[in-house]
Each structure stands twice: as C-alpha cells, then as structure tokens.
Amino acid sequence: MNKVLNFDTGFVWSMRLMALLVIGLVVAVGYVLVQGSSEAFQKFGLSFITGREWDPIMGSYGSLPFIVGSLLTAFLALLISIPFSMSIALYLGEFANKGKISAIFTSLVELLAGIPSVIYGFWALFYLVPVVRWIQERLDIPPIGVGIFSAALILAIMIIPFSASIAREVIRMVPVGLKEAAYALGATRLEVIKDVVLPVGKSGIFAGIMLALGRALGETMAVTMVIGNNNIMPDSLFSPANTIASLLANEFAEADSSLYVSSLVGLGLVLFVMTALINFLGKMLIRRLSK
Amino acid sequence: MKLVNRKRRTARRYFLDRLVRYSVYFLCGVAILPLFFIFGFIFSKGITILDWEFLTSLPKSIGESGGGVVNAITGSLYLVGIAASVAIPLGVAAGTYLSEYRGSKLANILGQAVDVLNGVPSIVIGLVVYELVVLPMGGFSAISGGIALGMIMIPVITRSTEETLKMLPKSLKEASLALGASYATTVLRVVLPAGLTGIITGILVSLARVAGETAPLLFTAFGNPFVNLDPLKPVSSLPALIFNYAVSPYEDWHRLAWGSACVLLLGILALNLFSRWLSRRYRWY
Amino acid sequence: MKKTISALLIGLTAVTGVMAETEILGAGATFPYPLYSKMFNEYYAKKQVKVNYQSIGSGGGVKQIMSETVDFGATDGFIEDAPLKEAKRPLVHIPTCLGAVSVSYNVQGLSNLKLTPALVADIFLGKITKWNDAKIVAINPSAKVLDKKILVVHRSDGSGTTSIFTDYLAKVSPEWKTSVGAGKSVSWPTGLGAKGNEGVSGLVKQMPGSIGYIEIAYARQNKMAVATIQNKAGNWIVPDLASAASAAAIKIPDDTRINLTDSDAKNAYPIAGFTWIVVYKDQNYGGRSKAQGQEVAKLLGGWFMKEAPMPNPSITASCPQTRSPRLKRFLRV
C-alpha cells in the first residue's frame, strides 16, 4: 500500500514538474526578451519606439518604421480578408452547415490553413508579385511589385481560414429558436443574418478577427519574401518596407554590436507584447461568450 | 397603390436576399482560389522534378544542374523527430495536468502560460532559442532547431490533450478507482489510453504545423549542404532550403525549391489526412 | 537560468561529442559563395571532410565568428581595428579571392550601359530617377527613349558587397560620404532591399527598370547586363577577372586589410575588393577538440593556399596574394 502511495505521489509530482517546466519555458522567453533588450531601452528610452532612424553605422536604432510596417500590413490584410472570411463563415455556418459540399469546402479551407508560410511566400514571389507589378504599371506607379501591398495580399490569404473558422463556430452557436422565430415572422435569410445572427455573434466574430490579427503580426517568412525589405518609413501602400518579424529574419543573424543585438531583441519584445495583448483580448472575448 | 408598394418592397427584399447569397457564394469561391493556384503551381512545377536522384542526392554547387535535396529531407525529419521527443512528453503531461487539476492555481497559471506560448511569433522563438541554447552551446545545431520547433508544438499538444481528456466520461475514471487502481495507474492505464486517438491526432496536427516552419530555424538549425545526423551540428531543412533557393536567381535552385515544396506539401497533406482518418476511425469518446 | 541550461547542454555535448565526426562550419559572405561552393564540394570529394558553408552575408559571418558559433567567418569588408580589438582573442584575415562588384541592370533596349562615378552615386542617392535622364543620355544615347523610372535594389542584410560598393561611392561622391557613409549595412536613401547577392540578382532579374550591385559571378551566371564604369584614370572598364586583378596591383599591407576601390591603377575596375576568411589564430578555444582545430588549419592553412583548384575565371577572380608564402603562417592549433 505504501509503495502504491509512493508511486502515486511520485507520479503527481512528476506531472507537476512537467507543468512547471512548461511555465518555465514561457518565463524564459520573457526573461530573454526583457534582459536582452534592456541595453537598447536604457540607451534610447521611449525614442526606441518612436524613433524613425534605423542606422546600424551610426548606432542609432529607432523602430517606428517597423512597428508601422507591421501594423499597416496586418490591418490591411485584415481589411482585405474580412469579406472573404465572413462569406466562408456565413456559408459554412448558415447557408450550408451540413452536407457533402459543405464538408468538402471545410476540408479545402483547412488545407489552406495548413500550407506553410514559406510556400505562400514562394508562390507570392512568382505569381502574386508579377500581378501586383502589372497593376502598378496600369496605375503608373513604379512597378516594384514587392512591398506592403503584396505582403498584405498574401497575409490576407493566409489568415482567412483562421477568422473564418472561429466566426463559423460562433454563427453555428446562435440558437436555432431565435432564427426560426425571425423566419416565422417572414424575414428573409439576409434579414435573419443581419438582425439576428450577426448581432448575437458579433463579439465572437470580433474575437476571431483579433486572433487573425495576432497571427498576421507574427507572420514572418511569406512577408519577408515579398515586402521589399526597406528600413525607411513607408509612405504609400505600395512602398517597400519591413515588418518587425521580417527585420528580425533579415538582421538578427548578423547584428554585430551588442547595442544592435539588444535593439533587435527589443523589437522581438515589442512584437511579443503586441501579439500577446491581442491574443489575450481575443481569448477573453471568446471565453466570455462561451460562458 | 399601397399593395403595389408593398409588393415592390417584398420584391426588393427578396432581390437583396438573393444578391447577398450569391455574393457570399462568389466570395467563397474567390477565397478558395489561391488554394488551387498554389497547389497547381507547386505540383505542376514540382512533380516532374521528383525522381530518385532528387530524393537521394546532395545539392550540386552553384551553376551545375541536377542534384537533389536529401540533406534537407533527412534534416527536416530529424528536426521534427527531436521536436516531437521534446514536445510530446511535456505537452501530454501539461494537457493531462490541465484536465485533471482543472481550477487549481497551478493549472490556471499553466493554462495562461500555454496560451501565451501559443501566441509567441515563431521568429521570436528562434531568437530566444539562439540566446538560450545556441550561444551557451557554442554553435548552431540540430538540437537547438528541434527545441525551437518543440516549443511551437507544446501548446498545440497540450490543448488537444486537455480537450480530449475533458470529454472522457467521468465514470471511466471512477470505475477504475473503485476497482482499487491507484491514481497513477488510473491516469496511465485508463484515462490516457482512452484518449489516445485524440492525443495522437493533436500530435500529428502539431507535427504538420512545425514541419513547414522556417523562421525559428534561421538562427538555430542554420543549414547544411550535407546529410547530418549529429545533433550538435547544423542541419538543413526543407522550408529553409525553399526560402534560400526561392529568392535566388538560379534556375537550377528554383527547380530544387519547387521539388522541395512539392515534397513538403505532400508530407503535410499526408499527415493531415492521416490524422483525420485516425480521428474518424477510432474516436471512442 | 541561463547558467543551468548551459550546464545541462554542455553535459549533453560531452555525451554526444564522442560520436561526432569532423565537420567544419563556416558562414558569411555571399560574394564568394559561387567559388566556395565549388571548392568545398571538391574538398569533400578529395578529403572526405565536410565543410558546411552558409552564405548568410558578411555581417553575419563577422557576428558569428565573434560569438564563436562557427569555425570560420567570411567577409568582404574587413573587420575594422576597433571591433578587431574587441574580439576575445586574435583574429586573422585570410584573403581568398578578388572580386568585382558589378552594377547590374535590367532594361530592355539598353545594352552596354556606361556610367561615370558621379552617375552611379546619383542613381543610388535617388537623385536621378529616370532612365532617360539627360545625364545618362549624354553618354548613353540609346537611353533617350526609355521614359521609365529607375528602381534601385540594394542589400537588406549586412553585406561585404555593400561595404565595397559604399566605400567606393564615399570615395567618389562627397555627398554620399556625408549623407550615407560606408559600411556593411547603411541606411539607404532609396530603393528596396533583398537578401544576399542571390536575392539582389533575383530581384533585378525579375524587375524591369531595376539596377543593383552584385558580385560579377552572379551577373555572369545569370546572364545579366552589367555597366561599364569609368575609373580614376578616366578609362571605361568592364568588370572582369583581369580588371579586378589590376585593382590589386598596389601595395598590400601585411595583414591584407585594405580596400581596393577606386584604385589608381590604369586598367583597374574601380569597384573591386578582396574577400576574406576570418578565423581565430589560436584554434584552441571554447572547448573545441584539437582535431577540429587541426582540420580547420588543414583546410585554411594548407589546402586553400596550395592545392585548391584555381577557380574558373568566369566565376571569381582568384587572389594571387593568397598563394604567396608570406601569408602561410596563419594558424596555430
């Protein structure tokens, strides 16, 4: 009996240890980011965030162009993706929530979510960028092709499945009774969607959009391949730029001075905090909804 | 007069209804188009390249045509293997803990930690592992790449394990305890096996996800033109090779990148299909 | 926290280190990569020793050798005195070859573009924005009909190619010197960035109306057009093996750390430079095995100096100085 008990306590403790290890990992991530970036924050203070000059030769590191680049691409991608992700969510959650076509379509959307970032980037570089270049030629803009717009396009395609799947779940959760009551009053499907489904599901749909935003901010490879890697503040939707993630991918392996490294780690911290906040907000909304 | 008005309004309502429905269909169709474009692009370019030489030989030096990507294929398998051996024990244990001790303080913290870890951008994971593993170890290595990928897998496995175990009927556990089995035995021999399919599905899904990750490998696994099975030496991987070769000007390298993308997509597809088949075939609870 | 982890990992190293075979890891410059990839393939074929060279850019090469994560770094911008002193122990520069940074462009209907130093600077400063700018047309009459914007492509990573190119521009253009400066990564006034010589070539090749700077081997292998540049003596020079080698026909210091740009030599291509491999002189550091140090010495001290195949002239100019006996006393195991 004693032996069994010992085994039991050992088992419980080892599980607890594993749990602590996972927590420790997260603490380690935070520690490395805070510790590693302290030099940059001490040196530049707030101007690390608000500075526009990123100049490794002069040793001045202001990260505003990348913060702007990240936010601009992510929000633009979100804007482009919303009509599509909402359509998918409505189709799967409302128009055809059962049946073969719906099942096939669900699998296709899941497939889209499973394609690796680098393959999206590869495809974008050879297919999407020439299309953007063609558009630019028609608009009489320098036909660079790569830039914020291309990055936002590929990001939009990549995040559609995420916001769509959450929104679909939310739309399916809308009580059938509510909808049926509206139909009984003679409402058309559009009116049911507009006056019942969306108002009931809006916070959940919004949560899905937030999670997609978090995803878009952290996305690295596809963006790096098509954004044009320019460290100047973007001045148009077509200008080549850098996001925080793409800058890290480009410069982290070669930053030589400790201040340079520290500034890059600082950007990692900024990105980490931004995505963590957005994810946290999104999850709060979902949790409140499921209660 | 009024009747006409009402009729007209009804007609308008129905017209709008149809308009929205068709535009939803249309937008859905457009949204899924990239999938066909991407698969079409990768397979039409890549499938013709897949032959024995491509799968079994090393890349040639610049300017010579031919060659293969055996270094990247073995590297990817190796990295994913290391990642799995790091992440599966931790993830399954954490998930079990979350479901067994729901509501306890540690479980709440753990839940938050897992959520945070799930949201950490993969490039930041790479950076952290460089500082935490590569520098102290004095070099790039397969093991550091595996750890980076493992950190991405952990939250996925944890959550899927938790979800699976949560759904098991309570009576199962109670029956085992009532028969005199110890708590550890109950968890190890009854609870976990009952949820095995769900757990394995979660693991497969997480494997499919990290197999395509590039960003965390840039500063950890680095790259290698040779096949390497030493955990302390750098290794190549399919996604990293695709990245390096895709942006290059060399046609031969583009060819290798297309072929590698094809292999990678097929691998991920197979993992996804297998996990789906498994969960449909053996979902007990 | 870091300490515990590193202790754990070192323990792991000790366990697995036994089964390791020798493999030399190098990283850095993309500039000589076409040459290195050939040489190291041959080294493996002849000596069965694997040399893993990752072309991550010169900036990365210097950073990684400084943080001791690689056996050797490679760069085409030498390490300046101040950072060289910061290194934990003496580093040596081994010049491996000479190369020319070509100004490559992609404009249909424009062959044999000629550029003066001032024109190159103005284009990369963003002051000349159209291909039919009067200053370009003055020496390239065929550009008259090209009413197209000039799209400048530069490096996004820290690069020795950039350091050679910007060093040149700073020498020939006072404005460049004051507003941009020279170095491995500068803050570019215009244009878009791409990773590595590979990336810049890829982008220029894909983008009509673009101009960028790449090592001549990349332009050759991809059949891209390169500009003829006027040198200090006033001659129009095409970048190639001979004209790059002429740039080195000046007095070279003992440690070979010198910029060859804007050379006084009559037939020199003005944007040329050495590319170096950088290693620790004393190979016994950081708990490396003696065998590892010996292998590095064999590769860099022995084979590279004596037996390495002379590269095909179409690839990269070899460095004659490398083979001179005075550079043979490099490494100590």
Image: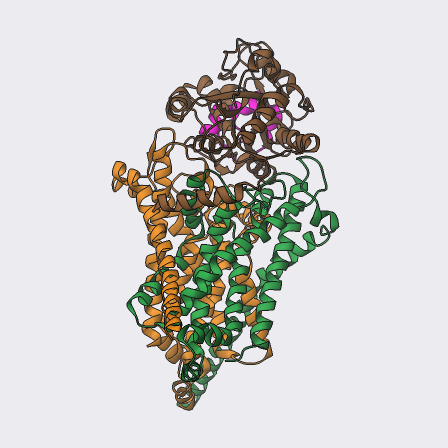
Could you tell me which quadrant the C terminus of chain A lies in? bottom left
Where does the image place residue B124, in percent across and percent down from the top left? 41, 49
Left or right: residue A9 compared with residue C166: left
**In the rendered image of this protein, which colour is used for chain A?**
orange
Left or right: residue B267 compared with residue B202: right
Tell me, yes or no, whether the highlighted magenta stretch contains residue C300. no
Q: For residue C313, which quarter of the picture?
A: top right
Point 45% across, 87% down: residue: B7
Segment tinted magenta in the rendering? C120-149
**Of B225 and A124, which appears nearest the observer?**
B225
Relative height, residue A48 to residue C275 (above, below): below
Q: For residue B68, which quarter of the picture?
A: top right
Tell me, yes or no, whether the highlighted magenta stretch contains residue C124. yes
**In the rendered image of this protein, which colour is used for chain B?**
green
Chain letter matching colour brown: C
**Of C134 and B283, which appears nearest the observer?**
B283
Applied colour scheme? by chain
Relative height, residue B274 to residue C120 (above, below): below
